[in-house]
Image: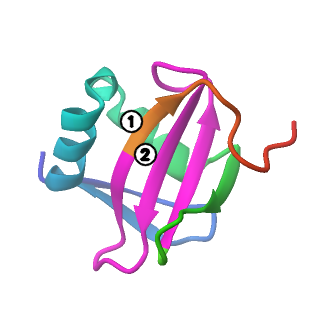
């Protein structure tokens, strides 16, 4: 895989490149079969919020991936804008209200 891309709800192009995907799979092997779910989370999240690191945003989607929630971090200070990590989580995201 060289890269795949999607567009977030604000119309911004987001790339999932080989380095980003390798990091996701190396750190969270349970996501190896869920690359399309990572991209779908960015394009149509159920919840969004800031990341502790400046220039990054978190995208959350329920019912995709290996856990209750799939969380994807996108770095908007990178060129191109890119996915830097993703993981499954059972807990609701901060600030989530159904």
Residue 95 in percent (x, y) is at 79, 50
Query: Which region of the structure is painted magenta?
Result: 56-85
Left or right, 98 with respect to 48, comes to right
User: From the image, which quarter does the N terminus lie in?
Assistant: top left
Residue 92 badge: none
Could you tell me which residue is drawn at 65 percent across and 59 percent down? 49
Label 2: how many Cα within 10 Å (few below 14, some 14–19, many 20+)? many
Residue 36 badge: 1
Asked whether the beta carbons under mark 1 and mark 2 sit within 8 Å of each other, the answer is yes
Q: Determine whether 20 is above or below 32 in the image.
A: below
Q: Is residue 9 or residue 87 the one in the foreground?
A: 87
Query: Can you tell which quarter of the image residue 37 is in?
Result: top left
Could you tell me which residue is drawn at 45 percent across and 55 percent down? 73
Residue 96 in percent (x, y) is at 79, 44
Residues at marks 1 and 2, CA–CA distance in whole angstroms: 5 Å
Could you tell me which residue is drawn at 36 percent across and 72 percent down? 81
Q: Which residue is mark 2?
A: 39
Q: How many marks?
A: 2
Could you tell me which residue is drawn at 32 percent across and 21 percent down? 30
Q: Determine whether 26 is above or below 23 in the image.
A: above
Secondary structure, mark 1, is helix
Secondary structure, mark 2, is helix
Left or right, 73 with respect to 31, comes to right
Q: Would you say residue 64 sits in the magenta stretch? A: yes
Q: Would you say residue 30 sits in the magenta stretch? A: no
Q: Determine whether 85 is above or below 88 in the image.
A: below
Q: Is residue 10 or residue 82 the one in the foreground?
A: 82
């Amino acid at each position: 895989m060289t890269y795949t891309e999607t567009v977030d709800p604000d119309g911004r192009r987001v790339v999932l490149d080989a380095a980003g995907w390798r990091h996701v799979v190396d750190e969270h092997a349970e996501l190896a079969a869920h690359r399309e779910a990572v991209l779908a989370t960015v394009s149509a999240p159920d919840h969004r919020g800031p990341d502790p690191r400046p220039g990054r945003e978190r995208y959350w989607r329920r019912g995709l991936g290996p856990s209750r929630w799939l969380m994807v971090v996108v770095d908007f200070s990178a060129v191109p804008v890119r996915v830097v990590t993703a993981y499954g989580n059972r807990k609701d995201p901060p600030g989530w209200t159904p």
